[in-house]
Image (spheres, grey):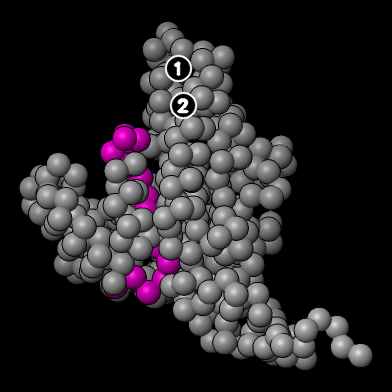
Amino acid sequence: MTFGDGSKKQGAFVLAAKGLTPGKLRGLQRISNPNGTLTMLALDQNNSVIDMAGKALRRAGEDRDPTYEEVVEAKLDLMRGLAPAASGVLIDPYYGAWSAVASGAIPPHKGLLLRLERTKYQMSPKGAPMATIEPGWGVEKAKRMGADAIKFLAQFEPTEPETADANLAMVERVYEECRKHDLLLLLEAVAFPFGGETKKDDSFLDRKAETVIETARILSRFCDVYKAEFPGTLDRESDQQLEDNLTALDAVSERPWVLLSAGVDYDQYRDQVEMALRAGASGVLGGRAFWKEYFLQDDAPSRAAFLADVALKRIADVDAQVRAEGSPWFSRYGFTQEDLESVRAVEGWHFRYPGA
């Protein structure tokens, strides 16, 4: 007597050979849509939230910064309002993680991504940003509290030798730590101005696309999902040039990649997302583009109305586009949905599964 059709192949070792070990595979399943695309919401910002909340208080006649409790409540309010339309939610450990889980603000069936890096960068002697981990926090703690994935951000500029080697070493360290704990790693890399320039200077904008593409070539192998900047600037470069840049980004990305929002306005982000999905992106991890006007509302009822109407619709619209046009994460690893459904582990696999 046999159960099932007896035709399933035993190929879990093939997944493991590509880095899709049980913990990482489960993490990908948890943060994804059913078809393998990714519509993720970023609420891990600290400095920008404090700044926006402080401006809102001053408009209301209170000349002060928000308290810890007020920042927590703002993040939970955003999460309750917007998480239903996302496949996963990214939150920081300092203000959000424990409160999000304890309060149920993040629904149990949504993927939980936790930020690893410190918001305030350590700076090199010449003023370039160095990737650092949040004090008192780490990969092991995130794993223990049930995170589905870690997100780590490293500002990276291949032509700036003072920080490139150090930040690459930190990325490799985090990648190995996530492998040790079998925890999914989502790596974010962003370009930065140096040598006295700003992000509005031609010198920075002229090299941004090349920086984004070269950074992906160097760093995307050290993660499980890669979070990329838009490689170029809308209205500064032609659509054809931007499409060529995105095609190049897709070609060098060794892992499935998603597009960050970098605080741009929603309409601009929507255009970027449309182009990125055509080029091969698996989805988005967007933040302020969806919700930053929350802090411009005059009172709690107005904020609630904004979340329920404008912000939720933004995420829902992007989610529909991601599901329809995004490349499933498993296709980047060389699998189809049917391949994954047919995988079986060999008897005794747990003896070879690494322990602490």
Residue 201 percent location from the top left of the image: 10, 45
User: What residue lies at 18% left-to-right and 62% top-to-bottom?
Assistant: 244
User: What residue lies at 56% left-to-right and 14% top-to-bottom?
Assistant: 301
Q: Is residue 254 magenta?
A: yes
Q: Is residue 311 above or below residue 250?
A: above
Q: Quadrant of the N terminus?
A: bottom right
Q: Is residue 290 above or below residue 240?
A: above
Amino acid under disc 1: Gln
Amino acid under disc 2: Val
- Residue placed under numbered mark 2 in the picture: 310
Residue 4 percent location from the top left of the image: 81, 81
- Residue placed under numbered mark 1 in the picture: 297
Pick the front one: 348 or 125: 348
- Dot 1 falls on a residue whose secondary structure is loop
From the viewer's perspective, is 5 left or right of 52?
A: right
**In 3D space, how far apart are the residues under numbered discs 1 and 2 (Cα atoms)?**
12 Å
User: What residue lies at 47% left-to-right and 76% top-to-bottom?
Assistant: 333
**Residue placed farthest to the right in the image?**
1
Q: Is residue 195 above or below residue 223?
A: above
- Range shown magenta: 252-269
Q: Is residue 125 magenta?
A: no
For label 2, count other residues whose C-alpha is less than 10 Å away and answer few (under 14), some (14-19) or many (20+).
some
